Image: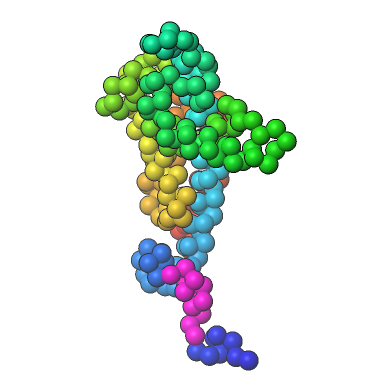
Amino acid sequence: MSTPAQAGVAPHAARMASIAAPRLAPYLACTGGNPTRALRLYEWNIDLSAGVYGILHRFEVILRNAIDARLCIWNATQRDRDTNRSYGSDWLLDPAPLLARLAERAVTEAADRAATAAAGRPNPTVGHADVLAQTSFGTWRFLLPDTDAGRQLLWKAEIAHAFPHLPTGYSGQAVTDEVDRVYQLRNRVAHLEPLLNAGRTQRQIKAAYDVAGWIDPELRTWLTSTQRVATLLKTRSRI
C-alpha cells in the first residue's frame, strides 16, 4: 500500500486538511505561505494558549474570590423595602434587588450548572461555593463599573474595597478596562483563536498581572513567577 507521500500527496496535507483552510490562513500568512512553518506556528500557538490558560486560571479565581467576598458583605447590609427583611450574606442564593438585576441571568445559569453537578452526590444540596465555582468570567467582568448607575453604586459602596492596592488616581473604569482586556484574551483562548499579535497578547497578560497586584501585590508575584508565556514568546522567532 502506498503512503500519501508516495501517492503524490503534499507533506502535511492531512494535517492541513484537518485544520481547515480558514483556520490555517493566519498561520500561512505569517510564514509566507510555507506549510511546514505554518504548522509549526500552529503548534506553537497551542503551546502559547496553554501557557496563557495557566495565567487565566489563576487570575479568574483570584478575581472572583476577591469580588465575591465584598458582595457577601454588601448583600448582608441590604433590606427588602416591602418587608424590611434583611438579606443574607449569600448574594448568589439570596440576592438583594440590585445584584438580582445586574447578575440574575448569570447566577441562574451558574446555579443550574451547580445543581446538575451536585445531582450525583450523596448530598445534592447546592451551596454558595457550588454556585460560585460555576460562575463564568463574564459574571465578574460585567459587575464592574460602566455607565450603569447601579454598577457605579456597587463599585463605590463595596467592590472598590476588593482592590485596596489600586494606585491613587485610578478609577473603577481603569479596573473595568484592564479586566476587559483579560476577558478578551480569555475568549480568544477559549475559542482556539490565534495569539499571533505578540504586543496585544503581552498587553492583555500585563492587565492580568496589574489587576492581581491591585488586589494584593503577592498575587501579582504569584502570577508572574509561575508563568511560562515570556519564554514561549521568545521562541516564535525560531519558527
User: What residue is drawn where x is 42% and y is 35%?
Assistant: 105
Q: Residue furthest right?
A: 122
**Left or right of residue 133, residue 213 in this image:** left
The N terminus sits in image quarter: bottom right
Name the one closer to the observer, 228 or 139.
Answer: 139
Any part of residue 35 in sight: yes
**Left or right of residue 145, residue 79 in this image:** right
Name the one closer to the observer, 163 or 91.
Answer: 91
User: What residue is drawn where x is 54% and y is 47%?
Assistant: 51
Q: Residue furthest top?
A: 84
Q: Residue furthest front?
A: 83
User: From what the image shows, is residue 186 above or below residue 62?
Assistant: below
Residue 186 image point, x, y percent = 45, 44
Residue 110 image point, x, y percent = 51, 36
Name the one closer to the observer, 192 or 82.
Answer: 82
Q: Quadrant of residue 32?
A: bottom left
| Boundaries of the magenta span | 9-20
